[in-house]
C-alpha cells in the first residue's frame, strides 16, 4: 500500500470525463463564410488440483493459495480453472469445491471479482452472466485462508438477419472462391484502434450487387460472432449493440479480427472481401463532445453513446444569433465564444453566461479562438491575422472572469498565433507571430507567469507545408500535435491541403508526420480524393485505454454515406496516438469518425476538455469525474490516505497507481495499452 495520496491536480480542479468542443475551423468569418458549402458452454478445466498439505510458506506446491491464517494448511479450489462458453445465450454453470489439507471443506464465502461477467452462489456454483466475456478470479475463504481459481467466460453468437439457408451459411463459412476482386471496402479502416464505450460503427463497402449475401465474422479474445446478412448497394451493415458491446467491453481490450465473405446470387462458392485487424483500447472515452456545426451556426453537444447531438447554445439561452470561434478550458469549467457576437463566457456546470463584453482588447472578434488555461481563469488572444474573419489579436493575458488585462506575466507586448495551454498547465504552445514556426513557453499555473520561450519546429520553405496551425499539447505535456499545409490557404480548410504532425514539446527539431491518422498510405475507397484532408487537431486532456487521443476535422469521405466533394463533407474524426512512442516513428493509428454526429451538418474544430466535476456521494465511473478525483464502486468518495489509486483516480507518480503497468499521466492513473 502507498503511504500517501496525491493532492488534487492544480490545473484540473474541476475534473470529469472526456469532452470535445469545436470551433469555427476555417477561421472566424461570419456564419455565412461557408455559404458555398453544400451543405453451452462446458467445463473444460475439470482436472482437480491436490494439496501436498504444506501451506503457509508461500513456496513449494501449496495449490493456488497457501494458508494465511496460521493453520499451517493449504486451501485449494477444485478445479483450479474452468471455461464457460456462452453459445447463443445458453451456458452451463460450473461447480467448484474446496479442500483444506486434502479434505473437502465448505468455505465460509465464495466471491468473484467481476460480477458483470459471472456470479457465484454460496455453494461455489459459478454462472456466466451471458453479457460479457473475460477472465474472472474466483476466491474462497475458510478459517482465515484464501484460495483462488480462474474462470474464463467466452461469448459466441450467430445471427442470421438475412434469413440465409443452411447451404448458403455453409458456403460463406467455408469460402473457396479466393480474394474478392470486385468489392472495395470503404469503412471502417483496417488497423483502427477503438475505445470502449462508443456507438458501434457502420460497416460500408462498394461495388456489390443486388442479392449478394454476406458473412461478417468478428473474433476477439473472449468473443466470437457470426452475422449472415443481405446488403444491397449501397452496401452497409450497422453492428448491433448485442454484438458491439460484448466485443469491445469484454476483457482488457486487445485484437479483434474482422472477416467479411461474399456469396453472389447463383455462385457455388464464396469469396473473401476483407480480413482486417482492429484493436480495442483498454478504456473508455467518457464525457461530452462539443463541436461546431458551421452551416447551421450552432455549437452542438453529444454524450458518448447517444445517437444524436443536442443544441448547447439553445440550452444556454442563445437562440437567435450565430456565434463562432469558441474555445473550452481543459477542466470543462468555461467555454468562451468570441466571434460574430460579443465576447461571452459560459459556465459549463450550469450552462449560463457569466461574462459578456462588447469591447475587450481590440474591437473585432476580440476573444475569437483564444487559449484558455486549464482551470478556465486565464486567456490569451489568438493573433493569427490570416484566418478568415481574423481574431482581434492583442498581446498579453486576460482574466477570463472579468475581462481585465493582466500585466507583468511575461507576455506584455508579445503576440502569439494560435496559442494553446497544455492540459497539465505546464506550458503554452503557439505559432510564432513572425516566422510562423512552432514554439513553446513554460508556464506556472500558480503565478500565471510565462517564461523561457523555445522554438521547436520551423515552418520551412516547402510552399505546400509552410503553414503550422492549431497546435495542441498532449496530456503528459511532452508532445504537440498540429496540422501542416500551405500558408495561408490551409488556415481555411476549403482552400489548402492539411495533414497531421506530432512534435516533441521538449526537444527542438523532433517532429513526425502522422501517416496512419492521415491515411497517407491507406487504400481509401475514394482514392486520392481523401488524401491531405485533415485539420485542426486537439488532444484529449487525459490518456485513456493505453493511448492518447486526438480529435480533428477532416473533409475525407465517410464510407458510402458522405461521398461528395471536399467542400460538401466535414466531420470530426478521432485517432489513437501511442504513449511513449520513439521519435522518428509514426505514433498514430487509423482514425474513426466520431459517432452520433449529424451527417447533414459541417462539423469541425474539436476542443477536448473534462466534464464539470461531481461532489462526494454522486455517481461516477472514473475519478476524473469527481471533484476530489477519487471514484470507488461507482461513487465519488473521499480517498484512503494510505491506499493506492485505482485506474482513473488521482496520482502524482506511477507508483501511486494500484494496477501493474498503469502510468500517471496528467495527474490520473491511466490503463496500459492492450497486449
Image: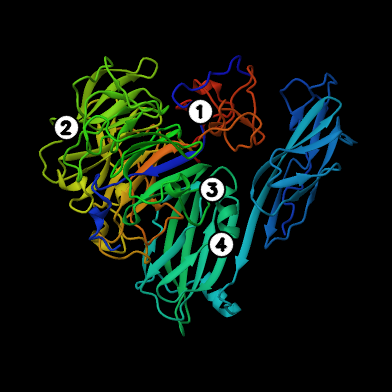
C-alpha span from label 1 to label 2:
33 Å
Element on which disc 2 rests: loop
**Residue under label 4:** 240
Element on which disc 4 rests: loop
Sequence-wise, the earlier of marks 4 and 3 is: 3
Q: Is residue 256 visible?
A: yes
**Residue under label 1:** 668
The label number, if any, that marks residue 197 in the structure image:
3
Q: Is residue 52 visible?
A: no
Sequence-wise, the earlier of marks 2 and 3 is: 3
Q: Residues within 10 Å of mark 2 (few under 14, many from 20)?
A: some
Q: Nearer the viewer, residue 281 or 585?
A: 281
Residue at 40% in and 73% down:
234
Element on which disc 1 rests: strand
Q: Residues within 10 Å of mark 3 (few under 14, many from 20)?
A: some
Q: Residues within 10 Å of mark 4 (few under 14, many from 20)?
A: few
Q: Position of residue 432 (x, y in %)?
A: 18, 30
Residue at 60% in and 68% down:
159
Residue at 45% in and 27% down:
666
Sequence-wise, the earlier of marks 4 and 1 is: 4
**Residue under label 2:** 458
Q: How many numbered discs?
A: 4
Element on which disc 3 rests: loop
Q: Is residue 157 left or right of residue 25?
A: right
Quadrant of the image occupied by residue 204? bottom left
Amino acid at each position: 500500500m502507498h503511504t500517501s495520496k496525491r493532492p488534487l491536480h492544480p490545473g484540473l480542479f474541476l475534473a470529469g470525463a472526456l469532452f470535445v468542443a469545436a470551433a469555427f475551423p476555417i477561421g472566424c468569418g461570419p456564419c455565412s463564410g461557408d455559404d458555398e458549402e453544400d451543405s453451452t458452454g462446458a467445463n473444460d478445466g475439470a482436472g482437480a488440483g491436490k494439496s501436498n498439505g504444506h501451506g503457509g510458506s508461500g513456496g513449494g506446491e501449496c495449490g493456488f493459495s497457501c494458508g494465511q491464517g496460521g493453520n499451517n494448511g493449504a486451501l485449494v479450489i477444485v478445479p483450479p480453472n474452468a471455461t464457460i462458453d456462452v453459445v447463443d445465450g445458453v451456458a452451463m454453470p460450473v461447480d467448484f469445491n474446496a479442500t483444506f489439507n486434502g479434505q473437502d471443506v465448505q468455505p465460509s464465502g465464495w466471491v468473484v471479482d467481476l460480477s458483470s461477467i459471472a456470479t457465484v452462489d454460496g455453494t461455489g456454483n459459478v454462472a456466466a452472466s451471458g453479457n460479457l466475456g473475460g477472465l474472472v478470479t474466483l476466491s474462497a475463504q475458510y478459517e482465515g485462508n484464501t484460495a483462488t481459481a480462474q474462470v474464463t467466460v467466452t461469448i459466441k453468437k450467430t445471427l442470421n438477419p438475412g434469413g440465409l439457408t443452411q447451404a448458403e451459411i455453409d458456403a460463406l463459412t467455408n469460402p473457396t472462391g479466393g480474394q474478392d476482386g470486385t468489392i472495395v471496402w470503404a469503412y471502417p479502416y483496417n488497423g483502427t484502434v477503438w475505445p470502449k464505450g462508443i456507438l458501434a460503427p457502420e460497416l460500408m463497402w462498394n461495388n456489390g450487387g443486388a442479392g449478394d449475401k454476406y458473412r461478417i465474422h468478428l473474433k476477439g479474445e473472449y468473443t466470437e460472432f457470426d452475422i449472415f446478412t443481405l446488403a444491397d448497394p449501397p452496401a452497409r451493415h450497422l453492428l448491433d449493440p448485442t454484438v458491439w458491446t460484448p466485443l469491445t467491453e469484454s476483457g482488457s481490450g486487445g485484437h479483434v479480427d474482422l472477416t467479411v465473405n461474399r456469396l453472389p446470387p447463383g455462385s457455388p462458392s464464396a469469396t473473401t472481401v476483407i480480413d482486417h485487424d482492429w484493436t480495442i483500447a483498454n478504456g473508455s472515452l467518457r464525457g461530452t463532445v462539443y463541436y461546431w456545426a458551421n452551416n447551421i451556426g450552432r455549437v452542438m453537444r453529444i454524450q458518448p453513446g447517444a445517437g444524436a447531438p443536442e443544441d448547447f447554445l439553445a440550452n444556454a439561452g442563445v437562440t437567435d444569433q450565430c456565434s463562432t470561434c469558441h474555445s473550452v478550458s481543459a477542466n470543462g469549467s468555461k467555454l468562451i465564444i468570441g466571434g460574430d457576437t460579443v465576447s461571452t463566457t459560459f459556465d459549463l456546470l450550469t450552462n449560463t453566461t457569466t461574462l459578456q463584453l462588447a469591447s475587450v482588447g481590440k474591437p473585432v472578434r476580440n476573444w475569437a479562438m483564444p487559449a484558455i488555461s486549464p482551470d478556465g481563469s486565464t486567456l490569451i488572444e489568438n493573433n493569427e491575422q490570416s484566418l478568415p474573419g481574423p481574431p482581434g489579436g492583442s498581446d498579453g493575458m486576460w482574466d477570463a472572469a472579468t475581462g481585465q488585462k493582466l500585466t507583468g506575466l511575461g507576455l506584455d507586448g508579445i503576440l502569439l498565433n494560435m496559442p494553446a495551454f497544455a492540459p497539465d498547465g505546464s506550458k503554452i504552445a503557439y505559432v510564432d507571430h513572425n516566422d510562423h514556426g512552432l514554439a513553446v513557453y513554460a508556464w506556472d499555473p500558480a503565478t500565471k507567469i510565462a517564461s523561457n520561450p523555445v522554438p521547436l519546429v520551423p515552418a520551412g520553405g516547402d510552399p505546400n507545408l509552410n503553414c503550422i496551425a492549431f497546435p495542441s499539447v498532449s496530456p503528459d505535456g511532452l508532445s504537440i500535435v498540429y496540422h501542416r499545409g500551405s500558408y495561408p490557404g490551409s488556415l481555411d480548410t476549403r482552400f489548402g491541403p492539411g495533414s497531421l504532425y506530432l512534435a516533441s514539446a521538449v526537444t527542438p527539431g523532433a517532429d513526425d508526420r502522422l501517416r496512419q491518422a492521415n491515411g497517407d498510405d491507406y487504400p481509401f475507397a475514394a482514392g486520392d480524393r481523401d488524401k491531405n484532408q485533415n485539420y485542426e487537431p486537439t488532444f484529449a486532456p487525459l490518456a485513456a485505454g493505453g493511448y492518447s487521443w486526438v480529435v480533428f476535422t477532416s473533409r475525407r469521405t465517410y464510407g458510402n454515406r458522405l461521398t461528395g466533394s471536399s467542400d460538401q463533407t466535414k466531420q470530426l474524426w478521432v485517432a489513437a496516438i501511442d504513449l511513449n512512442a520513439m521519435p522518428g516513428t509514426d505514433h498514430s493509428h487509423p482514425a474513426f469518425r466520431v459517432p452520433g454526429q449529424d451527417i447533414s451538418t459541417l462539423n469541425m474544430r474539436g476542443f477536448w476538455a473534462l466534464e464539470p466535476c461531481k461532489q462526494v456521494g454522486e455517481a461516477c465511473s472514473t475519478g476524473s469525474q469527481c471533484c476530489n478525483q477519487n471514484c470507488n464502486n461507482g461513487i465519488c468518495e473521499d480517498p484512503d490516505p494510505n491506499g493506492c489509486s485505482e485506474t482513473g483516480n488521482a496520482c502524482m507518480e506511477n507508483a501511486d497507481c494500484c494496477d501493474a503497468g498503469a502510468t500517471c499521466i496528467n495527474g490520473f492513473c491511466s490503463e496500459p495499452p492492450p497486449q
